[in-house]
Each structure stands twice: as structure tokens, then as C-alpha cells.
Image (cartoon, rainbow, N blue to C red):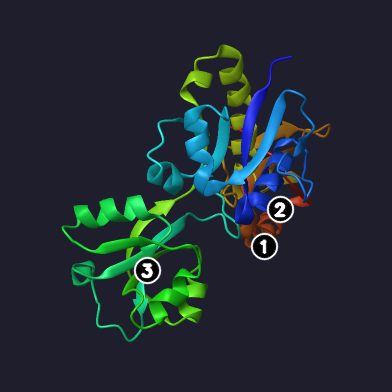
């Protein structure tokens, strides 16, 4: 039986990745004492790796496909095929940002002020290139952790380049952002040789379709309702639909049914308006996948 070697990110992205695969229809079980997860598809062989290393092993062919951030693809200068973007993170569905931060009391106000200074980060190669493009010469050193603490300790570093989703950790540590270096999202990437294999490429394409569909459904719900035909225009005007609503005839010619997909965040405002416009029997239901 052919198989596809799949790299899954361990650490902060692990739970959200497994959750995304579950919504796509794949059940992944992780043994805390093993880096080889069990996947309920016999054609998939999983391996847990740090997102920072994933692109390197996909590029080498150790893995056929892997999920990692655009930031780590860039930092490893990995020659891989990007299959899909999946803009999820460990806590939000927004892109994460790599930002340049300094202590609140620091005299550094702009990137130009980093000339001759020392910067700590995990994303060393991207940071060096970015500073070079900004015509700034600064010493960039690798941080093995506790990056935020280093900039607060006098004499260690003058600034840090750190990833953030909400900025709350930086604010809690009394750090000030002076610039955003990069926005990054998760990417499904593939080894170039594996991409030339028809079976592996098609299998990966199917997985990508389901993963993207699961992600797109994450903040959306379906609505069903009945209404008199003569209220159709008023009701449709209240629907900020993903696409045009599906309208079905009912047994009684004077009534129709509408089904539509909407953003979950808007439902609390939409439903009262739909009722006022004449909709009845409104049902809201969750979605597993939305595939265009």
C-alpha cells in the first residue's frame, strides 16, 4: 500500500493542528511518550516535529508533506512546494506577527536606531536579511528561549524580534513594539520530488481541500428558515451571505425555505432582523467544512 509521510508540528501548534485535522475528518491520537502519532487513515504515516525544523526535513525528503509556518520556511530557506495556506495559530485565527520590541523606557524609537545594537531572536536568518534590507547593521544572535527576559536584563541585548498573536505578553513585560517585520500563517508544504509522484500529489491535494474547508468553516454557521413568498425580498436583504442563499419551494406554494451560510459573529444581530422581516422556524447549525 502506498503511503504519505506527514509532518505535524509539536508544541504550541499541536493541539490546534490535531483539532483542524479532526474537523477535516482525520482522527489523530498522540502518545505522550512517542513522536509517532496514530492516524485513522492507513495511507498516512505521521511524525511530530518542531515547526522550526519541519521545512528542512520536508525539503530533504524525510517527510513528503508537513505543516509549518511561512516564517520557518523562509528562515530555513527551504526549497519546497507550497500546497495551501492555513491561517490558524495556537490561540487565534489571525496571522501571527514577528515584531521588533524594546523596553518601554528604551531610547530606541525606530529601526534606524538599531544601528550597531544587539538583537536576540529565534528567527535569525530572516531577521538578518530584513535588517540588511533596511540598511541597518546590527548584531543578531540566536535566542534559545526567554527572549523577552533578555531585553529587560541590562547589557544582554538592546532589542528582540519575537512572535506575537495578541501582543498581551509583550505588554505584560512592559515591552514596546517599534515595527512589524513579518506576518506569518501556517502552510501545508510538500517535498519537490514527492510532488512529482502522481499518487502523493493527488493524496495531498485531497487532504489540503479538506483542511482548507475545515478552516473556512471555523467561524461560520448555517441558517435555515421558512417564510412567506411575499416576504422573500425583505428577508434576503437581511442576509450577509457567503454566496446567494438557497431558496426551496415548500408544499404550500405561498411559503419557501431559505438556507444560507453566515459569519457566526453576525448571527445575534441577524436573527432578530430576520424575524422582523417575516422569517419563521429559524434553525442555526454548526459547520465542519466549507468548500468553495
Q: Position of residue 125 (x, y in %)?
A: 34, 50
Q: Bin the neighbour count of mark 2 within 10 Å (Cα to Cα): few under 14, some 14-19, many 20 and up.
A: some
Residue 164, compared with residue 9, is above or below; it is: below
Residue at x 69% of width, y 34% of height: 46
Residue at x 24% of width, y 76% of height: 109
In this orientation, which residue lies closer to the viewer: 106 or 253?
106
Where is mark 3, residue-wise? Answer: 160
Residue 83, compared with residue 20, is above or below; it is: above
Where is mark 2, residue-wise? Answer: 278
- How far apart are the alpha carbons under marks 1 and 2? 17 Å
Where is mark 1, residue-wise? Answer: 268
Which secondary structure, mark 1? helix
Q: Bin the neighbour count of mark 1 within 10 Å (Cα to Cα): few under 14, some 14-19, many 20 and up.
A: few
Q: Which quadrant, please, contains the N terminus?
A: top right
Label whose residue precedes the other's in the sequence (2 or 3): 3
In the image, taking residue 107 as reference, residue 81 lies left or right, namely right
Mark 2 or 3: in front is 3
Amino acid at each position: 500500500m502506498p503511503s504519505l509521510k506527514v509532518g505535524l508540528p509539536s508544541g504550541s501548534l499541536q493541539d490546534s493542528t490535531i483539532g483542524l485535522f479532526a474537523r477535516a475528518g482525520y482522527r489523530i491520537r498522540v502518545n505522550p511518550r512517542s513522536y509517532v502519532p496514530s492516524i485513522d487513515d492507513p495511507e498516512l504515516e505521521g511524525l511530530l516535529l518542531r515547526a522550526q525544523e519541519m521545512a528542512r526535513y520536508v525539503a530533504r525528503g524525510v517527510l513528503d508533506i508537513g505543516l509549518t509556518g511561512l516564517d520557518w520556511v523562509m528562515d530555513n530557506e527551504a526549497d519546497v512546494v507550497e500546497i495551501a495556506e492555513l491561517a490558524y495559530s495556537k490561540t487565534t485565527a489571525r496571522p501571527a506577527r514577528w515584531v521588533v520590541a524594546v523596553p518601554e523606557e528604551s531610547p530606541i524609537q525606530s529601526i534606524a536606531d538599531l544601528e550597531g545594537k544587539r538583537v536576540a531572536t529565534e528567527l535569525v536568518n530572516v531577521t538578518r536579511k530584513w535588517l540588511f534590507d533596511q540598511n541597518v547593521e546590527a548584531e543578531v544572535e540566536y535566542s534559545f528561549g526567554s527572549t523577552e527576559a533578555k531585553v529587560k536584563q541590562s547589557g544582554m541585548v538592546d532589542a528582540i524580534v519575537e512572535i506575537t498573536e495578541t501582543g498581551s505578553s509583550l505588554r505584560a513585560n512592559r515591552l514596546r513594539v517599534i515595527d512589524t517585520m513579518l506576518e506569518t500563517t501556517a502552510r501545508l508544504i510538500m517535498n519537490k520530488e514527492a510532488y512529482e509522484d502522481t499518487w502523493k500529489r493527488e493524496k495531498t491535494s485531497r487532504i489540503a481541500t479538506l483542511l482548507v474547508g475545515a478552516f473556512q468553516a471555523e467561524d461560520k454557521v448555517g441558517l435555515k428558515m421558512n417564510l412567506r413568498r411575499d416576504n422573500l425580498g425583505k428577508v434576503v436583504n437581511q442576509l450577509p451571505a457567503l454566496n446567494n442563499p438557497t431558496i426551496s419551494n415548500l408544499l404550500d406554494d405561498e411559503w419557501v425555505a431559505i438556507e444560507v451560510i453566515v459569519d457566526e459573529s453576525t448571527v445575534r444581530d441577524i436573527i432578530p432582523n430576520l424575524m422582523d422581516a417575516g422569517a419563521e422556524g429559524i434553525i442555526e447549525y454548526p459547520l465542519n467544512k466549507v468548500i468553495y
